[in-house]
Every structure is written in C-alpha cells, then in structure tokens.
Amino acid sequence: MTKMYMRGRKICSVDETQNKNTTVSVKYAKPKTNSSTKNQYGSESEGPKKIKNTTKGINLPDIKNVEKSVLQCIIGQDKQVRQIITAIYRAINFKTIKSNVLIIGNSGTGKTETIKQIAKQLHIPYTIEDATKYTQEGYYGNDVTDMIYNLLDNADNDVEKAQNGIIVIDEIDKKAGHEEHDVSGTEVLKSLLKIIEGTKIKVSIDEFSDDTIDFDTKNIIIIFLGAFSGLDKIRDKRLNSNPLGFQAQNISTEEKQKSRFLKQDLVAYGMPEEFVGRIDTIIEMKKLTKEDLSLILTKSQLSIFKRYRSELGKMGISLSYNKKLFERIAEESLALDTGARELSNTVNFIFENIMYDILANPNKYQKCTLYLDIVHDNTKYKLS
Ligand SMILES: Nc1ncnc2c1ncn2[C@@H]1O[C@H](COP(=O)(O)OP(=O)(O)OP(=O)(O)O)[C@@H](O)[C@H]1O
Ligand SMILES: [Mg+2]
C-alpha cells in the first residue's frame, strides 16, 4: 500500500548529466507480487515504514572468508566467484573506480545464486529486476524509479544502505536490438544509463508528508546478467579472422575457450555502444559439467538431495544408495541444458513416491533404499 502511494505521486528526477531538473509524472504502480520484494534477510516488507537515514559506514567481512562461504554453496565457478566478489569489494572500497559488472552464462550456472550468496554474506540489500519487464516508457524514468523503491524496500527503507546496495538486472541480453527498427529494447538500456552514470532521484520520505529526499545512485553497484546465446559464435568469428580478413586456421578450440568476450562482441550482438561502454567487468560463467552437477548434489550447501536426506533423517529414516546415483542424476539433468536448475526436478521426481509412502504410513519405516534405476522409474526403491 505504501508503495502504491509513494509511487503514485510526482517524482522529480535530477539529471546530473544534463545539469537540469526534470519533473516526470509517475504512474500508479501495481502492488508487487514477486519474491524480489524480500529483503536480504528473507522477510517481506510489511506496510508503511518511514524512510531512515543511517550514517553507519559499511563494515565488510574479510574477503577470503566471504569467498570460502560462497564456495560452500556455488560449485565449479571458483574463478568466477572470486571475480564477482572482487568486483563488488572494489566498487565498495574504491569509489573512484566504477564497477558495472556483466555476468554472461547459460541457464542454471549460478549467476543469480552467486550474487544472492555474496549479498547475504555482506548484508548488502539488493533487488533483482527482470529487464524484460521494463518497457520503452522506462525511457522517461518511471521504471528506473521503481527499481529504487524496490531496493529501498529490501533495505528496510534505510536510504544510506540502499544507496550502497546492488541492483541486479537480469535477462539484459533480451534487450539487444538486432534490427534497426527494434528500438524499444535499446531505448530501455539507454534509460538505465541514468542510474549507471549516477543521478539523484527524489523519493518520498513517507506517505504522510510531501517531503522528499535525494536518492543518489552513484554508489549503487549494477550487475547485469544474461545468457547471450550465440555470443560465442560471434567471438569465434572474431578469433578466426585476422586483420586482413583471412581465416586463421591455427587457433585451437582450447585457445578459443580461454579467450574472453570483448565489448566489440557485445556490440556485434546488438547491445548499444553507449551501454557496452559503461560495462567495466565482463565475467563468463563456466558451463557446468557432469562432475560439477554431481558435486553440487554431494557437496553444495544448497544441495536438494542433502535436504531430502536431512528431512528423512529427522523422521528417523536413514537413506541408503550407491554413490553412482549422483552420476546418474547428473547425467539425467545435463540432458536438458538448464545446468543445475534441472537437478531439483530430477531429485524431486526421485522422491515423489517415497514421500507419499512415508507420509501415508507415519512411524512405519526406518530405512529407505534407492536403486540406481530410480532416476528413470521412481518406483525403484524399498522402504523397510
Ligand atoms: N554453480 C552452482 N553451484 C551450486 N548450485 C548451483 C550452481 N548453479 C546453479 N545452482 C543452483 O541452480 C539453481 C539455479 O541457479 P541460478 O538461479 O543461479 O541460475 P542462473 O545462472 O541465474 O540461470 P538463469 O539464467 O536460468 O536465471 C539455484 O537453485 C542454485 O542453487
Ligand atoms: Mg538467474
């Protein structure tokens, strides 16, 4: 309700780049329903809250400890996790070095989860925004303001915290304009430049007064995420041709894989140059292998398999299985090309009948044996 009221009023946007004040009318926003309104402690924002302004500085935990904790959850992306943590620490510690990060990676490689885990460790508020939700109207500033209110919600309306928060903009690749007439996507990107460049946006203090404060976006860390499918082909084309346009035959696949994505690849993909020019760090998530997926099941603190085992344990039921089961689950999940995302579906399928049996027969069983075939046929288990 608060948000509807706050967003329903006129908001004055001070555009520093043009050094003039522009007043833009903000439409009434629909009440939010998605999970990105949760704050970093996992609680939903509840009703009207007066905006706070704390003067506390940010005390960051030891970077090595944060890395260690995140790696207990995120598997197979050690280099990438370090790159992302460094980019975030760099942005917080060295204000003169801008840090707009772009993370490229296939579905289910851990782009979103890595940021969530880091933000949790650092107690930094964040909001995850879906770029596809933003329309060309965003060009006039409306939607950019929505992002700020979401961030404020997740910072429990603490302006100081929110001004040093993280805005994650997901699915940014969907805003690439490949055709000349496809301007809506690229216009949305250009509207985001306002936040990236550092602007002051007036936000309402509370619903009972007309007072506003300047919300400064200059210290906000912006992290863009996208799968950018097909970008590797653009990179390969670049690597394969020498400056004279002849095909260079002597570049090995290994070398190609080692080669980083360059900004020119993103421009060739259809991202506007003004946008790409403001990206300071490009991080490429690794495609997860069968071994990585097995390790996620056995080692990651986020493992859904471990959660089932622990829940059964609480009911006094021990789980028995051959270690090869993890390989089978990984193989099955890999087939769908959605990385670790598919692991939950496969594991939920495995336990579907088992959970029914257990719930239908309380206190009857002490042991559950899983046979390897259960990956394809979820009746292949024994409860005793
Ligand atoms: N490297 C990883 N290690 C451990 N778990 C992972 C990893 N990657 C993904 N997961 C798990 O898979 C699920 C999806 O991950 P995430 O949301 O980070 O994917 P994503 O890369 O953002 O993909 P998408 O592009 O589809 O949004 C999460 O529940 C997460 O726990
Ligand atoms: Mg994601």
Image (tube, rainbow, N blue to C red):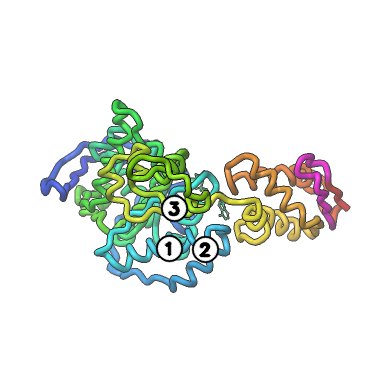
- Residue 181 % position (x, y): 29, 26
Identified by mark 3, the residue type is: Ser
- Identify which residue, 206 or 351, lies in the foreground: 351
The residue at the point 88 percent across, 53 percent down is: 384
Instruction: Using the image, tell me which numbered label, if any, was put on residue 371.
Output: none
Viewer can see residue 151:
yes
Q: Which element is circle 3 on?
A: loop
C-alpha distance separating marks 2 and 3: 26 Å
The residue at the point 86 percent across, 49 percent down is: 382
- Magenta region, residue range: 367-380
- Identify which residue, 222 or 150, lies in the foreground: 222
Instruction: Using the image, tell me which numbered label, if any, was put on residue 259.
Output: 3
Contact between marks 2 and 1 (CB within 8 A): the answer is yes
Q: Is residue 120 left or right of residue 22?
A: right
Residue that mark 2 sits on: 70
- Residue 88 % position (x, y): 38, 62
Contact between marks 1 and 3 (CB within 8 A): the answer is no
Residue that mark 1 sits on: 85
Badge 2 or badge 1: first in the primary sequence = 2
